[in-house]
Image (cartoon, rainbow, N blue to C red):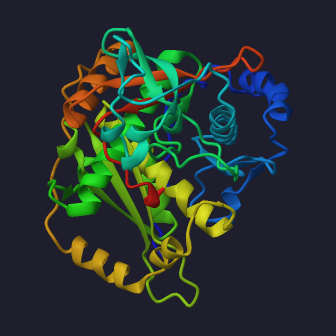
Amino acid sequence: MSTTATRPWQPPRGPYDADPAGTLARLDPVLGRCGITRVADVTGLDRIGIPVWCAIRPNSWSLAVSQGKGATPEQARISAIMEAVELWHAERVALPTRWARPSTVAEGARALDVDRLPDPDPAAHDRRIPWVLGTDLADGEPCWVPRDAVECDDRVQPGLPPAACQGGTNGLAAGPDLTWATHHALCELLERHAVACWERDESEASHRIDLAAVTDPVNRGLLDRFAAAGVVPVLRDLSAAVGLPVVDCLLVEEDQGSLHPLPQVLGTACHPRPEQAVTRALTEAAQVRATVIAGARDSIPRSRYEWYYDPAQRSAVAEELAEPASPGLPVSPVPAEATKAEEVRFLLAAARRAGGGRVAVVDLGKPSIGIPVVKVVAEGLRWAHDLY
């Protein structure tokens, strides 16, 4: 194991940094309403030390365990709670629903093209399907969105027709306000589109990032933590598919001869700022690793667990580390002084360019809870949902 000294870590800034204790106090009455019975610290199951927490909802209509990470235990706790809260909202979509065929739903207005959403049902055009009204992010005009693309209710309900398209949590986000939530949702959509392009056909260029190119104190501190734990991060630039920074982080054990090998895991992130994309990829990978060790995530199939512990994958990593790396981080067209709202415009433009279609947002917030939650749905963007 490496004995590299760990330098003081400057934690990354987030939307709840100003008053994490106050945020947790405001979230406390929400826990019971959203079915959260326990929020657990699982950081100690691993040796890296980046805080990872999980929120448990035994009566969930989809995932019962939601994960969160952060620079501090308070941030990670907030992150886990928000993940669970946003999913609770998506399970219980209470918006007015219109049943109509895709060809007749709009009636002069706009509607997303079901055929351009993930896993469309070819038979959806021959029957009435449920729709909810969202907003076209390009100009704020009303836009009909298939309810199946918004909802995350996985209960078995006899008599219901097949879903018109793939649902799931991709593009689902909560935040301190709608701008933050929309920003996070767009980043997730672009990240997963980039991963799908690379994973499915590898037609999009990617390259390994030289860790020496990571110079900011936040990420250098994270890299030092991995080194001290004997864990090797492999950073890859997957930005080509979306034109904004997308960073993939593969974590593997430095000691490959261990009798009890720990999993190799992936964490990926998109963000208009390259350093933030690196931070989120590194912390996401740490979260995934703790989650796999805990074994409590109820959406990970056996095939994925087999990948986590596949020795052939570890050999492939060794070969990749022998290849030359890029000396720099991904380049972003977003000005350093851009506001969060301005970043949303760049993200939206990237989503429209990559998918070639409309991008709509559906506001899922409930006054009784008081937390902004959105689902962003984009035509043409891909999602390898079996990887998440």
Task: Choose between 366 and 337: the one closer to the eye.
Answer: 366
Identify which residue is drawn at 51% across, 73% down: 263
Compared with residue 100, is residue 7 higher up or lower down, i.e. above or below? below
The residue that appears at 72% across and 52% down in the rendered structure is 64
Q: Left or right? Give the position of 323 relative to 292.
A: left
* Relative depth, front residue between 84 and 48: 84
As drawn, 307 above or below 388: below
Q: Is residue 351 visible?
A: yes
Would you place residue 33 above or below residue 57 in this image? Answer: above
Q: Position of residue 59 (x, y in %)?
A: 81, 48
- Note whether 300 is above or below 349 in the view shown: below
User: In terms of depth relative to the viewer, which is nearer, 250 or 72?
Assistant: 250
* Frontmost residue, 374 versus 134: 134
| Numbered marks: total | 0
Position in image of residue 67 (x %, y %): 63, 49
Quadrant of residue 215 in the image? top left
Q: Is residue 151 left or right of residue 206?
A: right
Q: Is residue 220 at least partly visible in the picture?
A: no
Give residue 207's position: percent from left, percent from top: 18, 57
Residue 340's spot in the image, x, y percent? 40, 17
